[in-house]
Image: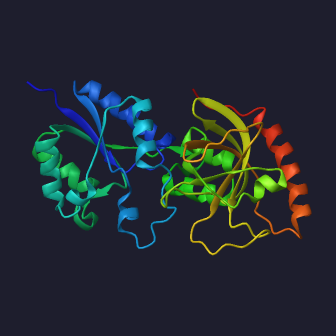
């Protein structure tokens, strides 16, 4: 007989410490029932796909999420939201049984699914009972007194508390983008920057940050400005600019993808009285970033 799957379902934006605790629980209950653990996930959050303003709404891109699931080690398969959206709760449950060989189900207490989110944990409990399928609700993970959630991490990033966001994620927050041509003003000021196109969905905290940078297989220190360049020329743009100054780096990398990891916030973006004042602050930013990055390391 084919081994059945003990399944958990969700968006898992951020694949944070709470999610990974859930995956550990899934491994345990699947082993208990002699089943295979399986994560079913939406590559992009349904709220993002349905939003009229989807810009900067996700913690992890589909590519990042796939990499994080692989690192976690629990088998994971993507779900097609457009195919799932019109299904009634019963039809969605039937899909789990027929297509994914459902043998057990583990969800969070606030899980909802199906057309207009009409299904909930109690519906699943009753549906599983009808077919004698094991069903469990996983407890929430907490940091201190707060429930660890994707929404909490989004708020923490927006507030600029990078160390706390990293602790909630269980790893440094990262952003990957393609290096594109900018106005090259940074080069003239003595601080050449790589300007990144990160797409529309990825959340970008605003301000100046100490960052680790990967170019190809090599890692560098640097600092990053994310914002609207109020000193040199305020831009009329919906999305902020991402500009990274990579320390001790002289290569041309236009068109290449690079990744940055956030260590800490240095300051908010500020409008200075002229370029001389801006350069003076950038020198201070560079030195502060170097000090922070001396004790900052990336997980293997």
Query: Percent from the top left, x then y, of residue 243?
Result: 68, 54
- Residue 87, above or below 141: below
Q: Nearer the viewer, residue 292 or 127?
A: 292
| The N terminus sits in image quarter | top left
User: Which residue is drawn at the image coordinates 35% and 31% (left, top)?
Assistant: 74
In this image, 104 relative to 139: left or right? left
In this image, 81 relative to 147: left or right? left
User: Residue 24 appears in which quarter of the rendering?
Assistant: top left
* Residue 135 visible from this viewpoint: no
Q: Nearer the viewer, residue 176 or 139?
A: 176
Query: Percent from the top left, x then y, of residue 288?
Result: 84, 44
Q: Nearer the viewer, residue 70 or 23?
A: 70
- Residue 268, above or below 187: below
In this image, 188 relative to 6: left or right? right
| The C terminus sits in image quarter | top right
- Residue 5, above or below 108: above
Query: Percent from the top left, x then y, of residue 249?
Result: 73, 37
Q: Which color scheme is applied?
A: rainbow
User: Which residue is drawn at the image coordinates 47% and 49% (left, top)?
Assistant: 60
User: Which residue is drawn at the image coordinates 59% and 45% (left, top)?
Assistant: 173
* Residue 176 visible from this viewpoint: yes
- Residue 110, above or below 97: below
User: Residue 119 appears in which quarter of the rendering?
Assistant: bottom left
User: How many tags in the picture?
Assistant: 0
In this image, 277 relative to 242: left or right? right
Query: Percent from the top left, x then y, of residue 248?
Result: 77, 36
């Amino acid at each position: 007989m084919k081994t059945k799957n003990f399944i958990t379902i969700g968006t898992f934006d951020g694949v944070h410490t709470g999610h990974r605790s859930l995956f550990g629980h899934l491994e345990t209950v699947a082993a208990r029932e002699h089943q295979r653990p399986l994560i079913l996930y939406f590559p992009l959050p349904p709220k993002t796909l349905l939003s009229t303003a989807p810009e900067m709404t996700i913690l992890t891109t589909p590519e990042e999420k796939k990499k994080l699931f692989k690192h976690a080690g629990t088998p994971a398969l993507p779900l097609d939201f457009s195919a799932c959206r019109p299904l009634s709760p019963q039809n969605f449950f039937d899909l789990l049984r027929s297509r994914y060989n459902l043998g057990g189900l583990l969800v969070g207490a606030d899980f909802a699914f199906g057309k207009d989110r009409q299904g909930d944990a109690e519906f699943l409990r009753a549906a599983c009972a009808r077919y004698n399928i094991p069903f469990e609700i996983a407890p929430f993970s907490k940091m201190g007194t707060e429930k660890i959630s994707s929404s909490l991490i989004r708020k923490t990033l927006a507030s600029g508390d990078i160390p706390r966001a990293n602790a909630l994620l269980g790893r440094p927050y990262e952003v990957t983008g393609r290096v594109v041509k900018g106005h090259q003003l940074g080069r003239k000021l003595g601080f050449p920057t790589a300007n990144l196109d990160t797409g529309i969905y990825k959340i970008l905290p605003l301000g100046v940050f100490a960052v680790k940078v990967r170019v190809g297989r090599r890692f560098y220190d640097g600092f990053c400005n994310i914002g609207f360049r109020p000193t040199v020329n305020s831009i009329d743009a919906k999305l902020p600019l991402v500009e990274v100054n990579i320390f001790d780096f002289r290569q041309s990398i236009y068109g290449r993808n690079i990744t940055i990891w956030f260590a800490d916030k240095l300051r908010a973006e500020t409008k200075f009285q002229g370029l001389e004042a801006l350069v003076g602050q950038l020198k201070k930013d560079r030195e502060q970033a170097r000090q922070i990055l001396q004790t900052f390391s990336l997980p293997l």
